[in-house]
Image: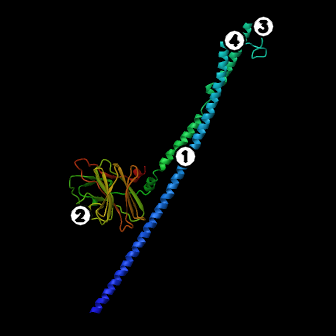
Amino acid sequence: MKAQSEEMKVTVQERLTRQKEAVACRMKKLDAKQNEIKKKYSAIRENIERKYEEMRRVLEEDCRITLSLLEMEEKATVQALDGFTERNCAVLSEIEFRLSEGLMDSDVQSGDLVPEFEDRTGLICSLALWLAARVEDLLKVTDPGLVRLDEVKAEQILDRTNNLLLFIRSQTPIVKRLLKSCLAEVTLDPTTAHPKLIISPTQDSATFTSLWQDVPDYEGRFDTTLNVLSLQSWDTGRHYWELDVKGKVYWELGLTYPSIPRKGRQEDCWLGRRDESWCVEFFDGDYTAWHGGKAHPLPVCTQFNHIGVFCSFPAGLVMFFGEDSMTPLFAFCAGTFTDRLHLALCPGHDLQGSNSQPIKICNTSQAKS
């Protein structure tokens, strides 16, 4: 008996040793995987940063060239006007000199600007006519209207600059364009809606009502929490939905497996309180992300009118965004989803009229615009 006991002890110890080695090996692999993921994300960030830096350099160089062209044109135009001014100043100085000298007090030699005359009156008239002709010619060749801005070209530069800005804005935020390419049609399943939720005829919105509606008590209907699930479910690909929560002070929305409890203990039916669902909750100005009963308070102060929900089956990701500005709110990584996912939402109680607005699903044509 003692020998058998010792043998059993050795067997157990060997088994525990193998299990310890297996767990240690798994921890080592997990650590290696974590380092691998960090390196890949770091490389992706560096590549993206380089591309943005390159775009910044390209735009700065284009701005430098454009402004240099305008500066060069301005300099040439100003120099031309300076030349006009200098010529006018020279003639003006000569006229003032003649006036101060009484026209004839200065000696006029043969071969000067005017021919020699026998009498002083003729000389004065000739000089006056010569100055008048010179001034007339000067006013013609130094007319400010002769110097013009190439307004057509300037407008073309401005238009191209504006078009470039509009194009950049049309392509950003890049994340928004990427996610909206994953927009999925979705409608709500009235057979899952709590009896105090009114589902619109188009099945795209849920509104709280204080009246307990007379609806069939389907097995899949929530009866303790104000939840409703989507009619559709997904198990592959990448999907994005946009929800209108404008005017609400309380709501919950997220994704869930079909196995979420629909009846019984209230806490089990709340979104994010168990392992089969992920959600973001908004209440009285505060955002909280939930999964597995663990709360993650979010440092966000903005009250968004639209919330985006994204899931990626290849990466096992659930992500939430303040869709108005594509502000990332929170991300969960499930690793691998084990079941199909439904969109889930809770519009919350009326709260004495302060939360009476519905949660509305933005259809894909609205969301893409």
Residue at point 68%, 12% (across, down): 101
Q: Which amino acid, mark 3? A: Glu
Q: Which residue is mark 3?
A: 118
Q: Quadrant of residue 329?
A: bottom left
Mark 4 or mark 3: which comes first in sequence?
4
At numbered mark 2, what does the secondary structure look like: helix, strand or loop?
A: loop
Q: Which residue is mark 2?
A: 263
Q: Work out whether residue 107 or residue 26 is closer to the camera in this orientation and state it.
A: 107
Q: Which residue is mark 4?
A: 103
Mark 2 or mark 4: which comes first in sequence?
4
Give the label, 1 or 4, closer to the camera. Answer: 4
- Distance in Å between CA atoms under marks 4 and 3: 16 Å
Residue 114 percent across, percent down from the top left: 75, 15
Q: Which amino acid, mark 2? A: Lys
Residue 316 to residue 252: above or below: below
Quarter of the image for the N terminus: give it: bottom left
Give the label, 4 or 3, closer to the camera. Answer: 4
Mark 3 or mark 2: which comes first in sequence?
3
Residue at point 26%, 55% (across, down): 197
Mark 1 or mark 2: which comes first in sequence?
1
Q: Which mark is residue 60?
A: 1
Q: Are marks 1 and 2 in contact (CB under 8 Å)?
A: no
Q: Which amino acid, mark 1? A: Glu
How many numbered marks does the figure carry? Answer: 4
- Distance in Å between CA atoms under marks 3 and 2: 127 Å
- Distance in Å between CA atoms under marks 2 and 4: 115 Å
